[in-house]
Image (cartoon, helix red, strand yellow):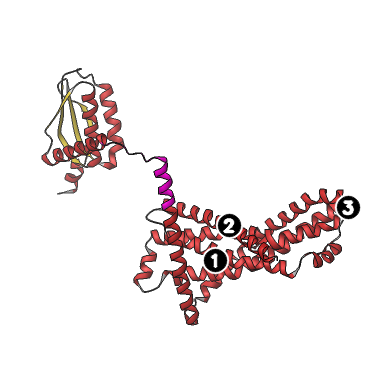
Amino acid sequence: MSRSTASASLSAADISPGATPGELRCTGAWLLRSAAQIEERIGACLKATTLPAGGELLIDAQGITALDTSGAWLLHRTRRDLEAAGNAVRFIGLRPEFEALLRLIATRTGTSASAPLHVPGIFARIGGKALENLFGAFGLLSFLGASAIALMRELLQPRRVRWKSILYNLQTTGVAALPITGLLSFLLGIVIAYQGAEQLSRFGANIYIVDLVGLSMVRELSPLITAIIIAGRSGSAYAAQIGTMKVTEEVDALRTIGIGPLDLLVLPKVIALVIALPLLTVYTDIMGILGGMVMARAQLDVGFTTFIDRLEDAVSLTSFMIGIGKAPVFAVIIALVGCYQGFQVSGSAESVGQQTTKSVVQSIFLVILTDALFSIAFSWLHI
């Protein structure tokens, strides 16, 4: 078929009044790419044409050169609307293959319209959600086990450790996070000191602002706030990166050439974050206490030297180590949840966004839950 012939056979779809009253004439290619134009032409034609009420209408489809599912659906819908207005509609000149497609569309549409819509009850929805969360928890535990086995394999064969990837992740998750974590911790120290200053000044206990700021930042708030910031910043990046690689089938390509995705994509992130988060926590300890020092000087006239002298007695080494000790646990949670949700992406960019959101929510929830469990355990141990 020559190019001109092919262009003619795929000419623009149209519907117009026929030569006689009660007749419509369809021409051109009724395809998905021109569905919007066809729909517009149908509306304009029916609006401009005076059709006999209750009589027989003929749709001359001899001029239709191509027809796909969307075009057949528009033809079927036009016939259905005309029949709903009380007319008997009959197609003439329709090719056998087009007629078969139109019958199939009519059959499927009738089946779906007559099928009762099943709406699950509230208990069914709660049960389904519980099962979904249970399967998700089992999947995360399975992923944790597989990652632990891969880590043991690398520790037994140090040559397999990907140091370049670890250093790159240290730079992106650790060094690049210094500005935001430092600024927020500094502001948090200011807020804590400001809130405590008024109460302490009433009782003449200005110097105890050091205990308030030092203990709250070092033991509790710095590890928790740093972990939450990293979960939102790096955990989401892990999920988005791995999810995008899964959509573009890069993960399957790695498996095909014999590279384990856990070795290349997960372990370097976990190891880098386990190293980076404790260091970031020490940094945020310093910045938070610095913010408290500034506010203590402004509100309570507690000088920097006095503040530092008191800090040595207020914050014990045990309290400092308790705060730092939480950080690696938080790092493992954030890295594994982010990577696991990345591997759960299926098919589309929308799925990448959904799993990234899930990774942030689940990471923050598990970090806070773990912090609460730490508090209960330390309370039992009286430390």
Q: Which residue in the structure is indicated by mark 3?
A: 204
- Residue 12 visible within the image: no
The residue drawn where x is 23% and y is 30% is 78
Q: Which residue in the structure is indicated by mark 1?
A: 332
Q: Secondary structure at mark 3?
A: loop
Q: Earlier in the sequence, mark 1 or mark 3?
A: 3
Residue 10 lies, in percent from the top left, at 21, 42
| Quadrant housing residue 309 | bottom right
Q: Secondary structure at mark 2?
A: helix
| Quadrant housing residue 381 | bottom right
**Any magenta on residue 144?**
no
Q: Which is nearer the eye, 165 or 226?
A: 226
Q: Earlier in the sequence, mark 2 or mark 3?
A: 3
Q: Are marks 2 and 1 in contact (CB under 8 Å)?
A: no
Q: Which residue in the structure is indicated by mark 2?
A: 369
Q: Secondary structure at mark 1?
A: helix
| CA distance separating discs 2 and 3 | 37 Å
Q: Earlier in the sequence, mark 2 or mark 1?
A: 1
Question: Which amino acid type corresponds to the residue marked 2 in the rendered image?
Answer: Leu
